[in-house]
Image: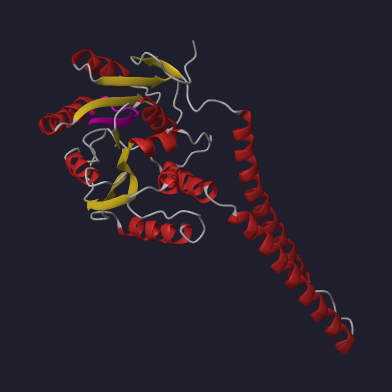
Amino acid sequence: MLISIVAPCYNEEDVLERFHEEVQKISDELLPLGHDMEFVYVDDGSRDRTLAVLRHLADRDSRVRYVSFSRNFGKEAALLAGLRHASGDSVVVMDADLQHPPELIKRMVELRDQGYDQVIARRTRTGDRLTRTLTARLYYRLINRLVDVELVDGVGDFRLLSRRVVDAIVNLTEYNRFSKGLFAWVGFPSTTFEYENATREAGHSSWSFRSLLNYGLDGLLSFNNRPLRAALWLGMGLLLCAGLYTAWIVGAALVHGVQTPGYVTIITAVTALAGVQMVMLGVIGEYTGRIYYEVKGRPHFLVKATNVERTKDLIP
């Protein structure tokens, strides 16, 4: 069985060679068991020498395949490119910064041989800051009440996929991709095991608080239309409150006579309603913007350099 290692890379020149050495060791251990490997690296428009390191690795190891983007298109595009160019019977998706321990590949292969199409590594929150742990738990509890698929805290892209799962993911042509949700949406028999996350070998994470917030918003909007439904119910609730308030004002005027209008009440009501309207417009705008990107039909990425003979989304 051929196993493809798919590793998106962004400014990973300091750790790539070490990462490749580690997965090579795992490959040597699996080879006597009838499992060969190929290594698919996707350079997501890095600004350092990542591409040069990948070319060097390809010269040394004929099993290395690399794809380099014309600019930074994001991890979702890099992941899609890696899956498109992976030819293995099974595909292991992992980060190239060694935060995903390569030795867990052997356990994934063992579970894959038991008939699972997805073998998912779930990292524990050991060592995380308390605020980050609580925020993550709150997010997953909230999002699982809204989205149409189940997202599990600690589960990311680190997993083994069978060929039919890879084909299913690649055939989903949507432009706005949220892979964690797509993996859950396609289904197929899955199993999960836990591991403790390792620290980065070198470099710094490109995930800022803002990017994490946008990523969480993508997860919320990609798999349901409930925010739109919530906006409808909120509008109806406000309409009901306005009707009750009007009835109370009219009743008070009939009983006690007309009083001086409340300036604070009017300003508060106008400001609150304007804020609610802006939130509703923002929700509608998010969905409309996604439709806008889908309709344009642009490719997910463009390739600048590759050692793969045939590639999609490549400008001649």
Instruction: Give, as a single range, the part of the protein colored magenta.
Output: 1-15
Question: Of residues 193 and 212, which is closer to you in this image?
Answer: 193
Numbered marks: total: 0
Image coordinates of residue 272 in percent, x first then y, are 69, 63
Q: Residue furthest bottom?
A: 255
Residue 12 shown in magenta: yes
* Residue 43: quadrant of the picture: top left
* Residue 268: quadrant of the picture: bottom right
Colour scheme in use:
secondary structure
Q: Residue furthest top?
A: 316
Image coordinates of residue 254 in percent, x first then y, are 89, 86
Residue 116 shown in magenta: no
Image coordinates of residue 246 in percent, x first then y, are 81, 75
Query: Would you say 77 lies left or right of 274 here?
Result: left
The answer, for residue 48, to whether it is visible in the render is: yes
In the image, what residue occupies the spot 50% across and 45% down? Answer: 218
- Considering the image in quadrants, where does the N terminus appear? top left
Image coordinates of residue 276 in percent, x first then y, are 67, 59
Please tell me whether residue 84 is drawn above or below residue 243 in the rendered image: above
Please tell me whether residue 230 is drawn above or below residue 195 in the rendered image: below
Query: Would you say 269 lies left or right of 189 here?
Result: right
In the image, what residue occupies the spot 49% across and 14% down? Answer: 315
Question: Of residues 97 and 232, which is closer to you in this image?
Answer: 232
Query: Would you say 268 lies left or right of 202 here?
Result: right
Query: Would you say 295 lies left or right of 42 here?
Result: right
The answer, for residue 76, to whether it is visible in the render is: no
In the image, what residue occupies the spot 38% across and 20% down? Answer: 68
* Residue 33: quadrant of the picture: top left
